[in-house]
Image (cartoon, helix red, strand yellow):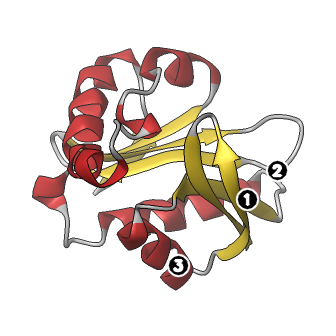
């Protein structure tokens, strides 16, 4: 297993994973999920992006570190690689990275219709902090202490 920082060469694989991972939610939400087509070029240039690489990229995570608490902006596992706990392993890597950077917590949000993701975040130790409309999406906001 290799978790590494993403580079420009990883963008096509991350885009494919995002489409495959989030496409099943279109019917449920009535629109494309926001993380389905992120600006990976901007994220790899300006944010922290990790990929899980086993000879090919199988998962990714985008962390935005600004002035406040870090935001896990997007995490996805290729549906062909699901069931291997790659998401959980990637979260563990992120948490070690953030702790080493001196952070004591981080946050994320997901769509209210992504019930599987909500359940997964709760199992991973996140606590719901609020919910509401943002950018035309019904979102649930989570936070996790490190």
Q: Which of marks 3 and 2 precedes in the sequence?
A: 2
Q: On the picture, is 45 further left or further right than 31?
A: right
- In percent of width and height, residue 94 lies at 57, 57
Whether the residues at callouts 3 and 1 have beta carbons within 8 Å, the answer is no
Q: On the picture, is 21 further left or further right than 115?
A: left
As drawn, 133 above or below 12: below
- Image quarter for residue 143? bottom right
Q: Residue furthest left?
A: 80
What is the total number of numbered labels drawn onto the structure image? 3
Whether the residues at callouts 1 and 2 have beta carbons within 8 Å, the answer is yes
- In percent of width and height, residue 18 lies at 30, 38
Q: Residue furthest right?
A: 67
Question: Quick one: SS at disc 2?
Answer: loop
Question: Which residue is identified by label 2?
Answer: 69
Residue at the (62%, 63%) spot, across then down: 95
Residue at the (81%, 34%) spot, across then down: 66
Question: Which residue is identified by label 1?
Answer: 106
Label 2 crowd (10 A; few <14 / some 14-19 / many >=20): some
- In percent of width and height, residue 139 lies at 59, 54
Question: Which residue is identified by label 3?
Answer: 124
**One can see residue 31 in this view:** yes
Alpha carbon distance from label 1 to label 2: 6 Å
Q: Which quadrant is home to the C terminus?
A: bottom right
As drawn, 70 above or below 90: above
Alpha carbon distance from label 2 to label 3: 18 Å
Question: Quick one: SS at disc 3?
Answer: loop
Q: On the picture, is 55 further left or further right than 140?
A: left
């Amino acid at each position: 297993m290799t978790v590494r920082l993403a580079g420009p060469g990883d963008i096509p694989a991350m885009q494919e994973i995002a489409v495959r991972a989030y496409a099943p939610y279109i019917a449920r939400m009535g629109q494309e999920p926001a993380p389905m087509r992120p600006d990976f070029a901007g994220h790899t240039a300006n944010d922290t992006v990790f990929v899980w690489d086993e000879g090919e990229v199988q998962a990714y995570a985008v962390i935005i570190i600004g002035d406040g608490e870090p935001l896990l902006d997007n995490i996805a596992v290729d549906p062909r690689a699901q069931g291997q706990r790659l998401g959980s392993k990637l979260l563990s890597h992120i948490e070690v990275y953030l702790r080493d950077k001196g952070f004591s917590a981080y946050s994320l949000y997901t769509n209210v219709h992504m019930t599987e993701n909500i359940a997964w975040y709760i199992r991973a130790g996140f606590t719901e902090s609020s919910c509401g409309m943002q950018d035309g999406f019904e979102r649930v906001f989570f936070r996790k202490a490190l």
